[in-house]
Amino acid sequence: MATATAPPVMVERLPRSRSLRPLSWERVTPILMIAPSVVLIAIFVYGFIARTAFTSLTAWRGVVPDYTLVGLRNYIRLFQTEKFQADIVNTVHFTVFFLAGCLILGLGAAVLLDQKLRGTIFFQNVFMFPLAISFIVTGTVWRWIFNPSYGLNVLFHNLHLDFLQSGWLTKPSSALNSLTIAAVWQMSGFCMAMFLAGLRGIPEELREAAHVDGATEFQTFRYVVFPLLRPITLSAVIILGHISLKIFDLVFVMTFGGPGYSTDMPGLNMFITTFRQDLFARGAAIATVLLLMVALLIVPYLVWNLRGETER
Amino acid sequence: MGNERWSRREFVGRAGKTAGGVVLGLGMADLLAACGASNAPAAASGTGNLEIFSWWTAGGEADGLKEMFGIYSKKYPNVKIINAAVAGGAGTNAKAVLKTRMEGGKPPDSFQVHAGQELISTWVKAGKMEPLTSIWKSEGWDNTIPSDLKAIVSSSGDVWSVPVNVHRGNALWYNKKILDANNLTAPTTMDDFLSQLGKLKSKVQAPLALGSQGNWQVQMLLENNILAAGGPDFYKKVFSGQASFTDANVKQALSWIKSMLNYVNADHPTLGWDDADKRLIAGTSVYNIMGDWAKGYFTANNWVANTDFGAAPSPGTTGKYVIVCDTFGLPKGAPDRDNAIAWLKVCGSEEGQAAFNPKKGSIPARTDVPASIFDPIAQQFITEFKTDALVPSSAHGSATPDAFASAVNDEMGQFVINKDVDKTAGNLQKLSDEFLKA
């Protein structure tokens, strides 16, 4: 709603200034400065989104484009396929556990590192480091770690913890959770950094005041620190959430969607459908559904953000 | 090549890891081709350029290609050959680049493509290829290339590409020493095979090695078993949409896979085909069903044919040959058309195929190339190729369009988990309705 009302304000202001000074540099310069990026974004982001949405309504399959409009047929077919149904379930499952894992581990690590003990800088870097690695590397390494015959299982066996052994990526029941572990390993450091910044941004006086009022350490956390971390948490959820919905590279190297459809994701399905099967219209339909899913997550955040700004 | 494991066509994936560099090289080649075209639009045979597009960038296949270039250069010393090979992804990168070039109206002079539907359902259907029927006739290839193979590269009365080599999809590989120690010989029927697996189960960890990462290996089991259950005629019918996948033959094929799965290694979903063959070398498995590119893996690991390992047709397919075949075609608007035609003649010649195939590890598409220059297993396959019924592989894009093969791939991944014969047969028929009846 806020997005809808914002532009008219601008439009109203512009004609008024134009009537005063038709060719003022002060007015033209900012427009010229912004114009290239506006044009580029209009073409390469919104233009292509529109093009993809249009393609998803056509009958295009095979190497020769076919722009016969077929309405929502591609979407109906798509939702009928067992694979895409599995994709949706997997994405939700993965996103929930990935977010929970990153937030809990990130917050835990941040709280520990905020205790101003020795070596915090060292551990801060240790936890942050996985973030510097690409998902491709993470995926490859974790695929080896999860190999049932020479990875974690051997370690557990040597530690006499055989009950912890698992088929990991080889069993449909455990593959998605194994994938989640690798993703959490990579991204929880990022959460930690955000929470750490948030914790350090909380004025010491607030905690002192709470202590003076007789709050225990836990109560201070529960009623002072946590509420102040809310904006940070929300930002982390948004950033991790859209990474999780669009996940591709990690799945690509770790499991390629298998066994069966147990770790398949919409991003991977889109790639296969479009570039292996040449079903361009259906691939575009997957892309559009994916965009809507991400929008579902991000638009409320943008609205909330804008509201916050206008209140300020 | 770790991250390329997933590919259906990984067997050609002994590709380098320098896709970037090669793409850059291709850019240059593009530029050169464009210059060549503008300077000499109608280059007579014997001068100008020849741009050959493939995904043979490394190992034996690149060496084989070089051999053929050598033969061409000897005949046409003034033609500059441009090797526009695109590395990586076992051909998938190359196909993507080819797509943009063909759509953009800048085709290479000739390009590598699997025989059959991979070309016919795409570029032939789009009207972007020239028929090669007259060249086929003038070169007399009817007498030297089997008619079954000609049928695979033909549609609506015309021939569309020239086969250079033939790989076999239905091969059974075994650790010969373990087999000998147990007084067994390679089985010819499926019942025989399954009972041998039962006997071997107590002796080795998993008698049948399987690497099913990407699922195309299971799809190969399916097509081999359909061939075993229904014979070549049924095979051709079912993969062209004229017979149903709910037929008893397909269900038989699926239940054979189900039985085989009782004897495979548990970690198969994370293994590639080469990891499965590694199990044979390690002695933890005895059998593996895989295309004849497995031979290259064994010999690269210093295993000697017919001493350490042996090969036979996959169970129940004696006298039948599943073809995986590379060919070259002639796109419309090739900038150096005459040179391209001369290239196709080299591809189809005895000299060209004799030079290429020993390096590539395949057998020649021509039946008159002397077998003596090949290894013993290739010799065995050459003999069988001459008399066997030949059928195109669906898993490798010859019998069916890519859209179908890729969807069947997924379906086989499901089957390995749910092992539901009737449901899978029904789903396969749905895919047939959707993709084979267009």
Image (cartoon, grey):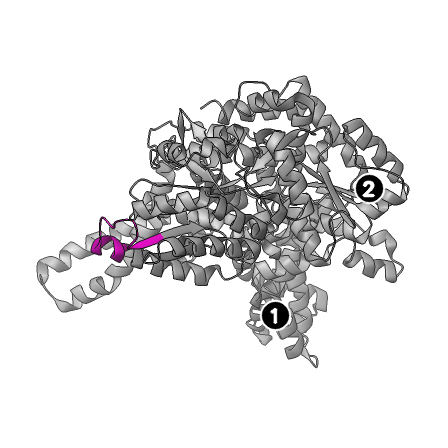
Q: Where is residue B104 in the image (x, y as percent from the top left)?
A: 31, 46
**Figure quadrant of residue B316:** top right
Q: Position of residue A154 (x, y in %)?
A: 82, 59
Residue ID for mark 2:
B207
Q: Which amino acid does label 2 sit on?
A: Pro
- Residue found at x 17% / y 68%: A26
Residue ID for mark 1:
A129
In the rendered image, the quadrant that contains the N terminus of chain A is: top left
Q: Along the horizontal axis of the image, is B180 left or right of B326? A: right
Segment colored magenta: B34-50
In front: B77, or B295? B77
Which chain is home to disc 1?
A: A
Is residue A103 visible in this depiction of the protein? no
In front: B229, or A209? B229
Q: Along the horizontal axis of the image, is B399 left or right of B79? A: right
On whether residue B43 falls in the magenta region, the answer is: yes
